[in-house]
Image: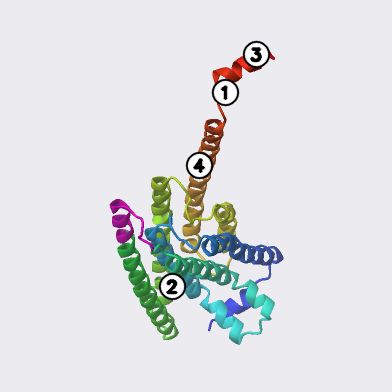
Amino acid sequence: MDLNICNNASHETVKFVVGGAITVGLFVSYIPQFHKFLTTRSSDGISSLFLLLGAVGGTGSFFNMVLLQYPNIQCCLHADWTPSFCIENTLGLFQVGTQFACFAAVFVLFYVFFPRRTSGCNASDLRRIHRERRTASVVATVVSIFLCVTVGAVMWGLVSTQGSASVGSVSPSQWLAGVLGLISTATSVFMWMPQIVETWIQRRAGALSIPMLAMQAPGSFVFVYSIVKQPGANWTSWVSYLVAGILQFVLLIECVYFARTSKASSSASSSESIVEELPVANSSQIDLIAKK
């Protein structure tokens, strides 16, 4: 353990308050999505590829932060740090961990409420459902394998670093953190693309929660600022969230547009139905009214 890291850690009240608020806000922002899953009992409209990229990227981000902040974790265990000071200097891990856990819950709920009914579907819908099932099955397998490989690699990185091994002038844990950060960045660039395309094709938000996007899109930029201020973090830790925030704004605008369009269409249809149901006066009724 490098005692210099423990001794050089500083206290910043603003960083602690902002970081804590972001952590709570992250969890709160996912509540509308959990609620929509549980009330509609459907995950229709959510792209499997979006979940694949999100799960891979979230895993990479979380373990990137584990590796980069591992010295601070050691300081919490062995140095004379108070619990509040420890939490303050590992807030990046708490924030990314909260994001990782919440997205993992979305991932699980997607499969719990995956559309299973095929009765009453035409041939085209049946082909689409079977195709989505195959894709979802492949996604679950790939994510499970990636998670297992990542956990094993992180354990190797931490053990190798303790043994003073290095790759050039960089320790194995730092090198691995960079790789995971780049994976997270690459997936975040494309993560929201499948969902943007899926929403455009279906012309509706489906099971995707608009309130969640409304909270997360602007919150991503505050989250980036908080990660930047964390000790040990570098650009590989926050750039993925910057890209994700920009694409979330695109998806949010798309969902709001289709929601308003759908509402306008429903109102127009209702008005036409009311007009069609109004009784039409016949000629004798018109003559009677004229005489009066």
Instruction: Name the element at disc 3.
Output: helix
Given the image, on which type of amino acid does mark 3 rest? Ala
Residue 28 visible in the current orientation? yes
Residue nearest the viewer, comparing 272 with 195? 272
What crowding class fits label 1: few (fewer than 14 Cα within 10 Å), some (14-19), or many (20 or more)? few
Identify which residue is drawn at 28% across, 56% down. Answer: 127
The mark closer to the camera, 4 or 3, is: 3
Callout in the foreground (2, 4): 4
- x%, y% of residue 221? 57, 54
Q: What is the CA distance from the residue labelled 3 to the residue labelled 2? A: 92 Å
Residue bearing mark 1 = 281
Residue nearest the observer in this picture, 106 or 283 = 283
Sooner in the amino-acid sequence: mark 1 or mark 4 = 4
In this image, 40 relative to 56: left or right? right
Tell me how far mark 1 sits from mark 3, CA to CA: 12 Å
The magenta region covers 117-131
Which element type, helix, strand or loop, lies under badge 4? helix
**Relative height, residue 234 to residue 71 (above, below):** above
Asked if marks 2 and 4 touch (Cβ < 8 Å), the reply is: no
Asked if disc 1 and disc 4 are in contact, CB closer than 8 Å, the reply is: no
Q: Earlier in the sequence, mark 2 or mark 4?
A: 2
| Residue that numbered label 3 is attached to | 290
Q: Is residue 182 visible?
A: no
User: Which label number is shown at residue 174?
Assistant: 2
Residue 10, by quadrant, is bottom right
State which tag comes first along the sequence, 1 or 3.
1
The nearer-to-camera label among 2 and 1 is: 1
The disc placed on residue 262 is 4
